[in-house]
Amino acid sequence: MKRLLYVFLGVCVLGVLFSQIGSKKDERFQTTFPLEEEVVTATLEKTGLPGIISESETNSYRKGHIHYVVRSPPETFDGTNYSAFLADISSANYKGERVLYTVFDQSVDSEQIVWEDWKQQIVFATLLYGGFENEEEVYQAFLEKEVPKDFFGKAVELPAGYSRVSYRGDVQLPEGYCRVSYTFSSYRTYNEDSFPIRKQSASLRVDIYESYELCQKLSTNQQGKTNR
């Protein structure tokens, strides 16, 4: 549910705001925005993420904006074809500046964030954005960032045995302003012998803006739409 909210808000904001924009690429970047499908596929291969673009979920609401969903290769599960969600990617130019929204899901062993477990995803977002001399620059920035004592907010207890905790961190780099949001979820279910067990998963959102000012502007616009 949290991931779906991230995706909905990100896509809506980009779709509404980017009406007077076009493709942009200059000497600072290695990618053209909005991102082309071939670039996303090549970057998946380069980082070793085992996913493919879901053609039926690809959409564009305005010129200069594109939204992709990446899923695992189809497999048979309980007699039906099943493809797990791996990533959501939204890229666009806003009045000449680029912005990238990405969301990733995976199972985790602990509510404490382990940056190494998300290295592929963060490098993937970094390469998609372009402009960074080192593909691990964003990853290293958060890896070296001191984790505050209140790293996680207060756990939120939800119905049916669900619980959730979240964290958000920002870092300013020469190539762009980066924001990471992490949400850990735990829920109660039952194994094949009908014994209660708990499953854990997490969502990582990596957003990269061309400037801090752009981040503030879009965050303000998004907050305004949420409060309506």
Image (cartoon, helix red, strand yellow):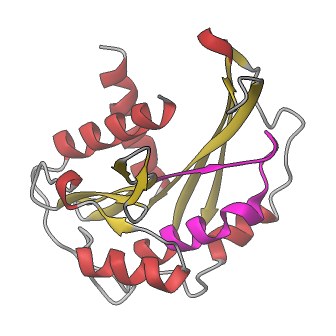
Compare residues 194 and 175 and report the one nearer the observer: 194
User: Which quarter shows the C terminus?
Assistant: top left
Which corner quadrant of the image does residue 144 belong to? bottom right
User: Can you give x and y, in whole percent of width and height, for residue 136 in the image?
Assistant: 65, 78
Q: Is residue 49 above or below residue 146?
A: below
Give x and y (percent) for residue 157.
Answer: 69, 13
Q: Foreground residue, 228 or 188?
A: 188
Position in image of residue 3 (x %, y %): 47, 37
Residue 142 visible in the picture: no
Does residue 215 lie above or below 171 as drawn?
above
Task: Please say whether residue 103 is one of the residues in the magenta stretch.
Answer: yes
Residue at x 90% of width, y 36% of height: 149
What residue do we see at 19% from left, 58% from top?
A: 65
Q: Picture coordinates of residue 147 (x, y %)? A: 85, 48
Q: Is residue 134 left or right of residue 3?
A: right
Quarter residue 118 falls in: bottom right
Q: Identify the magenta region.
A: 101-125
- Of 24 and 9, nearer the camera is 9
Query: For residue 37, what is the image quadrant?
Result: bottom left
The correct choice, above or below, for 115 with respect to 135 in the image is above
Reply above or below: 72 against 47. above
Q: Is residue 48 magenta?
A: no
Point out the residue furthest to the right here: 149
Residue located at (40% from left, 55% from top): 76
Q: Report whether 207 appears left or right of 135.
A: left
**Left or right: 191 in relation to 45:** right
